[in-house]
Image: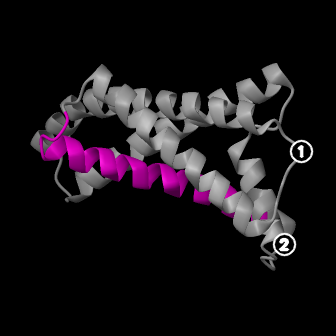
Amino acid sequence: MDIYIFIQLLIVSIAATSAMTLFSYAASASFRELYKEPVLLTFMLTKLNIEVQPKTKVVLAWLLHYFIGLLFVLGYYYLWINNILPVSFLSGFLLGFVCGIIGIIGWMIMFKLSNHQPEIDFKGYYFQLLLAHIVFGLVATLVYHLSLTILILVKAYVTV
């Protein structure tokens, strides 16, 4: 993987994670529930007795959220580059759905391991999380597809 592809995937993951997060924040506001992954991650870090300043904990939670998004995009890239799945609307939907299931299982495990049971509607949170990951998958696919043309042009005209 060269620097151009890494930057491309970083942009894709930032766009997709941001879209997913905006969806979660909108759902949180609409249903008046705590569906904000970075906020829940901050609480999780607190329950795990991570000894850092509160502001640092918030930054760590956001960085962790975006890092996980990057890991998902790297998985998507592997599937796309090896022609296991096409870069398409349907594959973006399916990848988002699968990542949503992985996300739900991950949150269930984190809540169990940390003994953190926030006062939230868990069924609603998990359903919203599934939809948010579908948004993630669709946006990741769209931005990746659009960035392919830009990447070709950059490689042709820019040297590092």
Q: Determine whether 22 is above or below 100 in the image.
A: above
- Please say whether residue 17 is visible from this viewpoint: yes
- Residue 83 x, y percent position in the rendering: 12, 40
Name the main secondary structure of what is drawn in magenta: helix
Q: Which residue corresponds to the image point at 10% horizontal and 41% vertical from the top-left?
A: 156
Q: Quadrant of residue 153?
A: top left
The answer to whether residue 111 is left or right of residue 150 is right
- Residue 9 x, y percent position in the rendering: 34, 47
Disc 2 to disc 1, C-alpha distance: 24 Å
Identified by mark 2, the residue type is: Gln
Which of the two residues, 72 or 155, is positioned nearer the viewer here? 72
The numbered disc on residue 79 is: none
The answer to whether residue 127 is left or right of residue 53 is left
Q: Which residues are magenta?
A: 57-85
2 or 1: mark nearer the eye: 1
The answer to whether residue 134 is left or right of residue 57 is left
Q: Residues within 10 Å of mark 1 (few under 14, many from 20)?
A: few
Q: Determine whether 57 is above or below 33 in the image.
A: below
In the picture of the structure, the residue carrying the numbered disc 1 is: 119
- Residue 146 x, y percent position in the rendering: 28, 27
- Where disc 1 sits, the SS reads loop
